Amino acid sequence: MSQVSQASKIIEQIPAVLPFDEHNEQLLANGHPSDWVNPDPAKRYNLVVIGAGTAGLVVAAGAAGLGAKVALVERSLMGGDCLNVGCVPSKALIRCAKAYAEVRDVGEFGVRVPDGVSVDFPVIMERMRRLRAGISPHDSVARFSELGIDVFLGQAKFASRDTVEVGGKTLRFARAVIATGARAAAPPIKGLDTIDYLTNETVFSLTELPKRLAVIGAGPIGCEMAQSFARFGSEVYLIESMHGIMPNEDPDMAGVVKKAMDADGVKLLCCGKHLNISQTDGGKKLSVDSHGNHYDVIVDQVLVGVGRAPNVDGLNLEGVGVQFDKTGVKVNDHLQTTNPKIYAAGDICFPYKFTHTADAMARIVIQNALFFGRAKTSTLTIPWCTYTDPQVAHVGIYEKNAKEKGIAIDTIQIDMSTVDRAILDGETQGLLKVHLKKGSDQILGASLVARHAGDMISEMTLAMVAGAGLGTLAKTIHPYPTQAEVFKKAADAYSRTRLTPFVKKLFNTILALRR
C-alpha cells in the first residue's frame, strides 16, 4: 500500500484531520506517520502509558527524563484532544472571532475602517490548521522517540495484570498508566440519530461557514463556539436545558457573558424542554419549548456541545481487575486503580476535564507509580477558564459550595468598571468576587469575568497555593495601570474591613496625643 493510500485510510478513521491539505498532512505525519514501524519491545518496562494526550505525554516524557524505561501507546493521533480537536483549534478560532469583533467595534477608539469589512471563513480555518500543524512536532512520534521512549501505534489491550498487547506485540510492565481520555458522546435527544451533526471532534473540519447554526448545550464548549460563529456571521441558536448559560458558574459572572453574547447576536433558548430534531428539505429542524414558548428552528448545521464518554473500549479492563463505569476509570486519591499496578490520569478518571489538570495529575502519577510517592489529587488547587469574550475564570469554592458545606464566608466584590486600565481599554464589562474564610483574609475561592480573566486568575491561584491571604496582596505592588489591579483593589477593600469602630477610635486617640 502506498504512503498516500495509507494516509487516506488513516483519515477515514480520524475525520478530525479533514480536509487533507498540506497542514493536515503535516499533522498526520507528526501525530500518526503512515510509515511508522513499531519497535521491538523491551524485556520489561518501568511504565507502559496508554494514550498520548496531555496526561500520557507528560507521564511518558517525565518518567523517561528520570531514567525510566517507558513505552507509549496511541491508537489515533499523538497530542490527543487538546492538540487535535480541543484547546488548540478552538482557541485559534476564538482569536479570529475576537479580531473581527475588535475591528467591528474599533470606531469607539476613533479609528475609522472602510465599509465592507468581512470574515473569510475558509482563511480562518486554514490558519487554524496551519498553526495546529506547526505546534504538532512538540507532541510527535519523532520527538518522543528521540526522548528514548518506545512509541507504539495501535489499539492497546491488557492481556494480563502486567502485560499489554498492541499490534501483535506484548509489552510487560512494572506499572501501567491509562490516559486514554474521553470522547464526544450523543446525549439522549429525540431525533438526533436521524441527522448528521457536529461535535468538537468534527467542527474543526468545516471549510464553509454555516449560515444557520444550532448549538446544543450552553456550557464552555457551547458558549465559546456559539459566540465565535455568531461573530463570523452565522445565525446562531444556543439551546440549553437549564436556565441561562454556564449553569455551573457564578450567576453574576454568567450574566455578564450573556449580555455580551446577546450583543453578538446569539439567540438563547434556555430552560429548553421537549427538544426534538428532524431532517427536512429546508435543513435540520429543532423543535423546543423555552420559557413557555414553542420554537421551530431550521438550521444548516447542529453542533452538540454536551456529552462525554470515557475511552475504555478494547482495553479489556474487566479482565485485569480495573473498575470503571460510564464516568470513567475508578481511582483512589493517589490515582491508583483497583489493580494496584495500574494508574490512570486525565479525562479518563477525573471530573475536571482540563488540559492543565491532566498535566498536574501526570506529575502525581510519576511520583506515586515510580517512586512510592503518596501525592494526592485532593490537594490540588485547580483554576479554570471559559474563553468567551469576556472570559470567565474561577478557582476554589463558589458561594453556593460554601452554603452547601456550611462554610461561613465573607465575599468582596470589585467591578472592572472601577479599574483604570479596564476603563482605558474599553473593557469594563466584568467583575471580581473573592470568597474569604469569615473573619480572616484566607482566600477560599475567586471568580473573575473580564477580557483577560484566564491570564489574571493565576494570581489568586498562587496566593491560595502559597497560603497567602488578601493581606499579602495588599502589600504587593502592582504595576499601574494594569487590569490585574482589580486584585489589589480587593485586597484594599479587605484592609478597610479591619478598620472597626474600636480600631478607628484607638487610632484617633493615638493621633490626638501626637498633635
Image: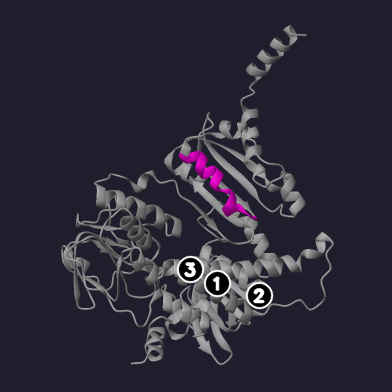
- Up-down: is 108 above or below 40? above
| Mark 1–mark 3 distance (CA, rounded to whole Å) | 13 Å
Please state which of residues 102 and 351 is positioned toward the viewer in this rendering: 102
- Place of residue 418 in the rendered image (x, y in percent of width and height, measured from the top left): 72, 44
**Three-letter amino acid code at the position of disc 2:** Phe
Element class at badge 1: helix
Badge 1: residue crowd in 10 Å (few <14, some 14–19, many ≥20) = some
Q: Nearer the viewer, mark 1 or mark 2?
A: 1
* Marking on residue 232: 2
Q: Amino acid at mark 3?
A: Gly
SS of the residue at dot 2?
helix
Q: Using the image, tell me which numbered label, if any, was put on residue 86.
A: 3
In this rendering, the answer to whether 211 lies above or below 174 is below
The residue carrying pointer 3 sits among few (fewer than 14), some (14 to 19) or many (20 or more) residues within 10 Å by Cα, namely some
**First reached walking from the N terminus: tag 1 or tag 3:** 3
Q: Nearer the viewer, residue 122 or 303?
A: 122
The amino acid beneath tag 1 is Leu
* Real-space Cα separation, disc 1 to disc 2, in angstroms: 19 Å
Residue 161, visible in the rendered structure: yes
Q: In which quadrant of the rendered view does residue 323 lie?
A: bottom left
> Residue beneath label 1, please?
131
The vertical placement of 442 against 235, above or below, is above
The magenta region covers 451-465
